[in-house]
Image (tube, rainbow, N blue to C red):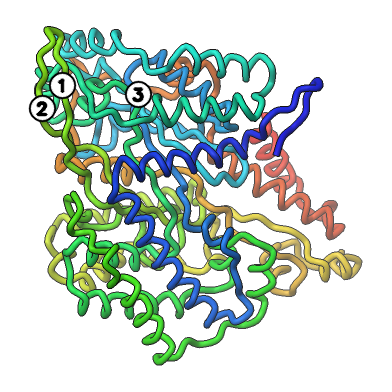
Amino acid sequence: MTTIAAGIKFANRLDMQDRLFTELSNMFGREVPLYDKALEVNRVCNSAVCALLRKVYPAFSITDAEFDHSSGERHGAIRIGRPDEYRWIGRLFECFAMEPHNFYDMTDVGARSQPVIATAFRSRLRPEHRVFTSLLMTDYFDTATQARIEALLATRQVFSDRAKSLITKCETEGGLSPVDAESLIAECTERIFKWTASARDHALYETLSSAGFKIAADIVCFESHHLNHLTPNTLCMDLYTAAMEHCLGGVDAIWLRARATTVLRRLAQSVDRNLMTLYFHTAATSAAVNAPPVALTEAELSTLVDDLMRELAREEFRLSELNHSGFKDFTEGPCAGLPILLRQDAYKALTEPVRFVEADGREILTTHTARFGEIEARAYACTPIGMALYDACLEHADRVREADPSLASRDLEAYEIAYARPFNVFPTTLEELLAKGLVYGCYHATARGIEHAAQLHDGTTDLLALARLGFVAYEGLRYEDFLPVSAAGIFASNLNQYGTESSARVKPVYTQAQLESVLGRRIIDVNLAYAGMEAESKLATYQALGMLERVTIVERTMLDRAIAQWQR
């Protein structure tokens, strides 16, 4: 798709974004064979989930394109060394309609702290892709180490002159032609984000790594902003993790069959129309889930598991024969069955050969461990009240895990029960989550509601109550962002190295304003965005039902303010 401005035909920026992620996936698959295979494992698991959903909702169907979309990459991660490099990254992503959302201070997440601050670049409305982008804070280190880091970083140029000219052209002309768009994507995959296995200053690399700053070593000593990981979407986190552990040789087929049976049974019992809408945001899905769900029989469940086992038994899924370091010990985020925020897991970072070229021309052949294979499952975005409750529950759940670190590997079922217990204060249905103000929703008047609007003048203005009468429909807003504690946990576990303390004489304090100064623009507050979208939908619903005059002044003021803050 293209747009036309001043007689110039521009490539559509969202189409460019899709193309970029397709090419990044191809690039990463060539660089890391295990990643390509993990994508296929995810597709097998998602296919099993779709087969189950067709049993529970017989009218449900999904096209090949929709299935590919639901299984595709949702985010990537890169790490940047210099502020000027970071500004170029921000300008680059702007060409793809991706803007900075939220400030993440990874130097301040307790025992998991790392010497970086970050934002995530994504589109504003229902984004399909995002890139978590970290900036190394060199003043986190003692002055001698800081000087060595900055001296080495100063000598590299990641963006070519061609890439810079294309970015500038996009800014000055308002877009890029399809040919120029493809050229910019090629710059991304052939240089900016490409892994080269070539590094510099082995002594600095060793200094940083031995001091616990492996992330800094990964940022400073390499020649590109290489893609650290890409993250596809899974429709069932626990099924995928079990399948990957089996394919990597960590568990046998008997264990996998039992685990798959448990997980799929649990999914069949918990899935409802709201979760279906979350998974597959299509008109066809909305129509299919209007009918009540059908109970899955044990015979049907057994057949689904048989089909899954048969697929995963294929020779191409013997991933234990590939270079790998095993799978992460536990899933980050909320417990299974609680549809909020984001769950993440990963196969561990690979140890890969690298070549250091020293200033005197000497070459040192060694290895580097940094790139891993993450997976994610996104659910509903929490309000500040919901996030505060989540943080409290997570702190409690982490203490439970730390009290018995090996429980997950010894007895997974017992671990899941123990980890979930602190989260029991959360309801698990969307209606209850919305009613308690724990998650954000989007509302609209139904055809029935509009038809009977005249009869609603003296009734309730409670949108959930009106939804129970069929006058209003709602859905939860999907969480499009990141959890700093989970991200730090993923970083740490993949490096077999948890957080690091600052070696500066006084640990610096970092702010969103600092990163905004680096970028030269405002970072979008995601809470304002979610609240604004919810408020706009509520106001439109009241308007459609002729109820606007009955909304209290207090609520109307709050809705107007939320919309204004979002749109500014």
Q: Tell me the mark number nearer the camera, choosing from 3 and 2.
A: 2
In primary-sequence order, the first of circles 2 and 1 is 1
Q: Amino acid at mark 2?
A: Leu
State the quadrant of the C terminus.
Answer: top right
Q: Is residue 4 above or below residue 338?
A: above
User: Disc 3 vs disc 1: which is toward the camera?
Assistant: 1
Question: Which residue is found at the position 49% from the left and 46% from the top?
Answer: 384
**Residue for badge 3:** 80
Spot occupied by residue 189 in the image (x, y as percentages of width and height): 43, 31
* Cβ atoms at labels 3 and 2 below 8 Å apart: no
| Residue 124: x %, y % from top left | 60, 38
Tell whether label 1 touches label 2 (CB within 8 Å).
Answer: yes
Q: Nearer the viewer, residue 89 or 563?
A: 89
- Asked if one can make out residue 435 in the rendered structure from this viewpoint, the answer is no
Q: Quadrant of the N terminus?
A: top right
In this figure, what is the number of numbered marks?
3
What separation in Å lies between label 3 and label 2 (alpha carbons)? 24 Å
Numbered badge on residue 483: none
Q: CA distance from mark 2 to mark 1?
A: 6 Å
Pick whichever, 283 or 566, lies toward us. 283
Residue 421 position, x and y percent, is: 30, 67
Q: Secondary structure under badge 1?
A: strand
Dot 3 falls on a residue whose secondary structure is strand
Is 408 in front, or is 111? 408
**Could you tell me if residue 159 is visible in this image?**
yes
- In the figure, is residue 534 to the left or right of 359? right
Find residue 198 and report its image quarter. top left
Q: Residue at x 41, y 48 (%)?
A: 388
For label 2, the residue is 365
Query: Residue visible at 16% across and 71% down?
Result: 411
Task: Identify which amino acid the numbered label 1 is placed on.
Answer: Phe
Q: Which residue is disc 1 drawn over?
A: 356
